[in-house]
Image (cartoon, rainbow, N blue to C red):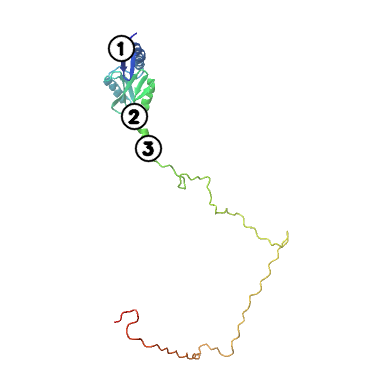
C-alpha cells in the first residue's frame, strides 16, 4: 500500500495515495503535455524568440494574423498562446489540467477546440461576453417597429367596424309600387291638384286716389283726471329717524 500518510492536495483536488495521484493526475498531465508538443503551432522556443518570429511573419504578410504556442516561463505548468494582429505581439495564459486545457475560465477537452474559440475571439472570452451584453441592452432600448397606422398591436387584416354604421348600399332603393297595380299593368298618374284659391279684394272706390292728401286730425283725447292726494304730514316718514 503506497500510502502517503496525510491527504495530498494539488490545486482543488485531493489524493489519498501515491497510486491515486499517479493515475488521476500525473499520467493525464503527461498525456496533455505530449499532445501540446505535437501540435503544429507549438514551438520549443523562449517567449521573446516567439515574438520575433511573429513580428517577422507580420512584416512579410501585413494582412495576416499569426500565433504560436510555447511554454510559459513565468508560470510553470502553463502554456503561453502568443499572437500578433497589428504590430505588437500579445499573449494569453493557457492552463493544463488532467481533463484538458483551460482558457478564460473555460475548460476544453481538446486543444483544437480552444484554438477555434481563440480565432473567433482573439481578445478573450471576457470581451465577448461584454459585447454580447452591450448588444442585448441596445436591442432592448430600440423600440419595436410600428405599422403604418402608428399602433404596435393593431391588426391590419381584420378590423371591427362600429355597430352604428350601416354598410353602403351599392344599388338604388326600389321604387314603391301602388297597391292597386297588377302584374304588367301601367299605374295611373295621380289626379291633378285643384288650382289655388284666388283671393278677391273689394274694388277701389271711383275717383282720384287719396295719396298725398292730408287726413283729418284725430279727435281730441279726453281730459286726464286730476287726482288729489292729502298733504304730507310734517316730519320724517315712519321707520326713519326724524331730523
User: Going 38% across and 24% down the picture, which residue do you hit?
Assistant: 116
- Residue 191 sits in which quadrant? bottom right
| Residue nearest the viewer, comparing 139 with 14 | 14
- Residue 125 sits in which quadrant? top left
Give the residue pinned by disc 1. 5
User: Going 39% across and 39% down the picture, which residue do you hit?
Assistant: 140
Q: Which mark is residue 126?
A: 2
- Residue 174 sits in which quadrant? bottom right
Badge 2 marks a residue whose secondary structure is: helix
Q: Residue 23 appears at what percent x and percent y?
A: 36, 13
Q: Which one is closest to the eye, mark 1 or mark 3?
A: 1
Q: CA distance from mark 1 to mark 2?
A: 42 Å
| Residue nearest the viewer, comparing 236 with 132 | 236
Q: Is residue 163 left or right of residue 23?
A: right
Badge 3 marks a residue whose secondary structure is: helix
Q: Which mark is residue 137?
A: 3
Density class for disc 2 (Cα within 10 Å; few <14, some 14-19, many ≥20) is few
Amino acid at each position: 500500500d503506497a500510502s502517503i500518510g496525510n491527504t495530498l492536495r494539488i490545486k482543488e483536488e485531493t489524493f489519498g495515495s501515491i497510486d491515486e495521484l499517479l493515475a488521476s493526475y500525473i499520467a493525464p498531465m503527461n498525456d496533455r503535455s505530449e499532445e501540446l508538443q505535437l501540435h503544429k503551432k507549438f514551438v520549443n522556443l523562449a517567449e521573446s524568440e516567439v515574438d520575433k518570429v511573429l513580428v517577422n511573419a507580420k512584416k512579410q504578410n501585413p494582412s495576416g494574423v499569426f500565433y504560436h504556442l510555447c511554454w510559459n516561463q513565468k508560470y510553470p505548468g502553463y502554456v503561453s498562446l502568443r499572437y500578433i494582429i497589428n504590430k505588437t505581439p500579445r499573449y494569453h495564459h493557457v492552463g493544463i489540467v488532467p481533463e484538458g486545457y483551460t482558457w478564460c475560465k473555460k475548460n476544453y477537452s481538446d486543444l483544437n477546440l480552444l484554438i477555434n474559440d481563440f480565432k473567433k475571439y482573439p481578445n478573450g472570452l471576457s470581451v465577448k461576453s461584454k459585447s454580447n451584453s452591450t448588444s442585448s441592452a441596445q436591442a432592448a432600448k430600440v423600440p419595436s417597429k410600428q405599422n403604418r397606422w402608428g399602433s404596435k398591436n393593431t391588426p391590419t387584416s381584420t378590423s371591427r367596424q362600429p355597430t352604428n354604421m350601416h354598410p353602403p348600399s351599392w344599388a338604388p332603393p326600389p321604387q314603391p309600387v301602388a297597391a292597386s297595380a297588377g302584374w304588367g299593368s301601367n299605374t295611373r298618374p295621380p289626379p291633378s291638384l285643384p288650382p289655388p284659391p284666388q283671393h278677391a279684394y273689394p274694388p277701389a272706390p271711383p275717383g282720384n286716389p287719396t295719396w298725398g292728401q292730408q287726413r283729418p286730425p284725430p279727435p281730441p283725447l279726453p281730459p286726464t283726471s286730476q287726482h288729489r292726494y292729502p298733504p304730507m304730514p310734517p316730519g320724517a316718514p315712519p321707520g326713519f329717524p326724524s331730523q
